[in-house]
Amino acid sequence: MTHGLQGAIMISGLYRGRDGDTALELRVDVDGPRPTGRVSGDLFATAGATTTYEASFVVRAPVVTAAGDETRIEGTGEFSSATPDQKVRVTLAGGRGTARVAGRDFPVEFASPHFREVVLEQDSVAGTVPFVAYDTGTLQGPAASPARRLGVVEAWAEAGVALTVTEPGVIPADGAGPDLAWDDAELHHAMTQQFSRFGDAPAWRVWLLVASRHVGGYRGIMFDYRDAHQRQGAAVFHDAIKGDSPQAQRAQLRTYVHELGHAFNLLHSWQKNLATPPQPLGPHGGFGDLSWMNYVQNYRPGGEEAYWAAFPFQFTDAELAHLRHGFFHDVVMGANPFGAGAAEVSPFEQPLEDHSGLRLEVRAKESFGFGEPVVVELKLSCTGEPRLTHGHLHPDTEFTQVTITQPGGRTLLYQPMMRHCVDHSPETLLDAAGPAMYRSAYIGHGRDGHYFQQPGEYQIRAQYIAADGSRVVSPPCPVRVRYPATGDDHRVAELMLGEDQGKLFSLLGSDSPALRPGNEALEELLDRYAEHPLAVYARMVQGLNAERGFKSIGADRRLRVRPPDPQQGVRQLSRVARAGTIDNITLNMVMRRWARAEARQGDLDRARAVLDEMVATFRDKGINPVVLGQIRKQAETTAQALSREA
């Protein structure tokens, strides 16, 4: 227990108690640093040597009465499950007391000044330098925020969360070669390997990997697949934030705290309206939040400079309330998603007024076979005067969100398997010379599994959050999934629609043993139905995975790299490219990867010929001249990169 300025004992913190076979963890938050004025708790049932979760509650506006050394706290609780007696009464004195919850009386005792206790396991790949601490007084900041030395543990302690860091591990990178860039498939494998040690039960435990860099240039990523392992791990990428300067140290602190915030089920500042229940957005559509969970470059008004000048290195009040008093399953790692997930949402609506000067379109082919991966094209264009905005159009970065209205009328929010945190938004100018930008997005499978599991008519809408905070909404795009016409169509769909297969399509292939059943299903599809139209997607996944190397962290905590198999890559990707069935943007990617496989076989001339064929293919398709010029430039850049690599 601690003393206040006038000598009064502060009572806020974590208390524990038991009544028979039921245990109570009680959180009192009515004084001390940044009190939220709440009391909350979780109830657990014990049977023999096992403990199970029962319920949570929160009192949002309790009445607090102090008389001498005794403090009484009373109010009506909101419970996670039906409870006849919702009155909550707590009496405390000298670090002990009683709590009446759900009609039961618990003797309680002070356990910690922190409201949550979490174990952090941190591993770093050899060659990276994990962040230690930053002195917040080194660079100019808000006068009201005291200068202090903040590490990750100290930052979370200020939020009321005690992080206990286990002995940090270093993952040797012997034989990894010069390419230590990680892709999503490798991170998925690393995290599932780590999670297999955690077990399937929700627990206050999280893993952080300090890796070298991500192929997409991201600063961090959070693994968020909806199963027992969701939100148990994150990665930060050293190369994007490394350095000893105060600016670099400050950026590292923010990135580490931000990624761990996702593990506690905190959404980005501009996404809180998608939470369950929806949370109000802060100023400027959430971009005005001074929070660890905002992006510094998107802060409004004033951008990065204004953010750091005003940021007090803390969470917002609403985020603090969630961290301290959110229901157990809404916060603990491995339990409920905080975002809407598969819960029904409303389709995005067009704004009443739109002066953004931007137009968003979703395009798809006329129909998809049952089980076929649903890929849409996103197009952002200017409608008049040139417009400057960011280029994060793909929904994996969460500046673009997609809703899917299914044949029965239910609307779901597409959510990717992994949350990519960009923290850097290069500006894109849309003008007469480049009036639009395009992205291809596979939305058939995500965090919540498969979204197109039945034939019928679907409606797709998208929302793009522009650099100035404008929310640009697309018209609806119809997507039709055809009914299977033959027995082979049925059997192929069964081989395509497994959960592991969906993950493989999202990750563009993987060596992970956890996804072996999915790979075996795709191999069976190619063995038995090689000429079926949907076989091209299985061939693409196998070809893309073969063409690249694959990193894995073994049980001995060493990093190993499976070298690329360019011969297999060429064999599969050349057939995919010439099948004429995949969308244009995916075709562009496949042909560039095919060219890389040729170069890795030592045939640069053949690689250049593939790139020439790519340009000719799109020219013959009658592609817009501006876009065709971009493809030519892309082919030239790729050829130069392959020459350097060779």
Image (cartoon, rainbow, N blue to C red):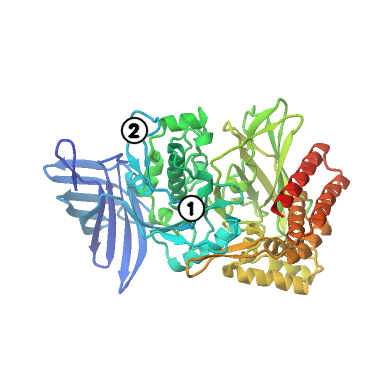
Q: Which of marks 2 and 1 is in front?
A: 1
Q: Is residue 643 left or right of residue 240?
A: right
Q: Identify which residue, 638 or 281, lies in the foreground.
A: 638
| Residue 199 at least partly seen | no
Q: Position of residue 535 (x, y in %)?
A: 76, 65
Q: Identify which residue, 115 or 100, lies in the foreground.
A: 115
Q: Identify which residue, 342 or 617, lies in the foreground.
A: 617
Q: In this view, does 608 lie to the left or right of 361?
A: right
Task: Read off the residue under disc 1.
Answer: 128
| Residue 147 at least partly seen | yes
The image quadrant that residue 562 belongs to is bottom right
Point 43% across, 29% down: residue:
309
Give the numbered dot on residue 288.
none
In the displayed orientation, state which residue is furthest to the left: 68
Q: Position of residue 482 (x, y in %)?
A: 76, 59
Q: In this view, does 372 lie above or below 631?
A: below
**Amino acid residing under circle 1:** Thr
Q: Marks 2 and 1, how far apart in space?
A: 31 Å
Q: Position of residue 271 (x, y in %)?
A: 52, 42
Give the numbered dot on residue 145.
2
Q: Residues within 10 Å of mark 2 (few under 14, many from 20)?
A: some
Q: Position of residue 526 (x, y in %)?
A: 75, 70
Q: Identify which residue, 10 or 576, lies in the foreground.
A: 576
Point 42% across, 37% down: residue:
246
**Amino acid residing under circle 2:** Ser
